Image (tube, helix red, strand yellow):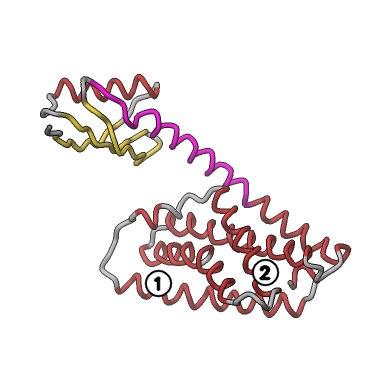
Amino acid sequence: MGVLRQDKKIMQDSLVTIGSGILFSYIAAIILTLITPLYAINSKISSRLEPNLLDLGVALISGIAGAYAHANTAIAKTLAGVAIAVALVPPLAVSAIGLGWGEWKVFFGAFLLLITNLTGMVLAGSFTFLLMGYSPFRIAKKGLLISLAIVLSVSVPLGYGFIQVVKENKIVNSVNKMEVNEMKIKQVEVINKNPLKLALKVVADHNPSDEEIQLVKKKIEETLGKDVELEMTFSLEVD
């Protein structure tokens, strides 16, 4: 609302609220990370290290929901809280974990997602308030353009991340359900992109020989057109 109306008082109050909330959340998360004897990048953490355009879409929808909830007295304000929790708290927590571990890759990846979601929510919220008639466009234009410029600037790495996700899915779909000498490949996962490393499960009705394992590797490399490292687990299929 402050951005939309160019109201410095509202913007200052909002920045203080957001800044203090983020600061206290970082302190709490870092302390919890330091006293917790865990050091493992699980799926919940890794999913927030490479943000893409899909994440920006979630932030925009959250911003619309939050703004509409505040503008419409018939809707519970808790809806805005849920939107914020979905879009902001997880990347904030993960970036704090990165600081606690001293892992800068974890911190910067999650921090980019945090900034993306925050700016996306501000832009979407501003547009929502504009459409609901809270400010004339001539006043709102400057704030909207600044918000849009910030969102577009962070969209560059997000676009790159989206391209990487598409490539990763293409690799997984090319290898998943492949059959080699009646051995079925399942549960393919990309562990590393450069050099390419895959984790997968091989299901067979017998214990594969070394020759058959190399045959699986060769078949995958021929399909993808590049060298690949594999982490294989084997599952015995019994009729």
Q: Is residue 84 above or below residue 59?
A: below
- 158 displayed left or right of 232: right
Disc 2 marks which residue? 67
**Of 38 and 204, which appears nearest the observer?**
204
Mark 1–mark 2 Cα distance, whole angstroms, equals 30 Å
Image location (x, y in percent) of residue 58: 57, 56
Residue 145 location, quadrant: bottom right
- Of the numbered discs 1 and 2, the one sitting upstream in the chain is 1
Task: Out of 112 and 207, give the one closest to the viewer.
Answer: 207
Question: In which quadrant is the N terminus drawn?
Answer: bottom right
Q: Is residue 37 above or below residue 58?
A: below
Find out whether the residues at labels 1 and 2 contact each other: C-beta distance under 8 Å.
Answer: no
| SS label for mark 2 | helix
For label 2, count other residues whose C-alpha is less than 10 Å away and answer few (under 14), some (14-19) or many (20+): many
What is the quadrant of residue 39 in the picture?
A: bottom left
Q: Which residues are magenta?
A: 154-180
**Residue highlighted by disc 1:** 30
Instruction: Report x, y in % for residue 235.
Output: 17, 37
> Which residue appears at 63% of the width and 65% of the height?
65
- The x and y percentages for residue 6 are 80, 71
Which label sits on residue 56? Answer: none
Q: Residue at x 53, y 57 (%)?
A: 113
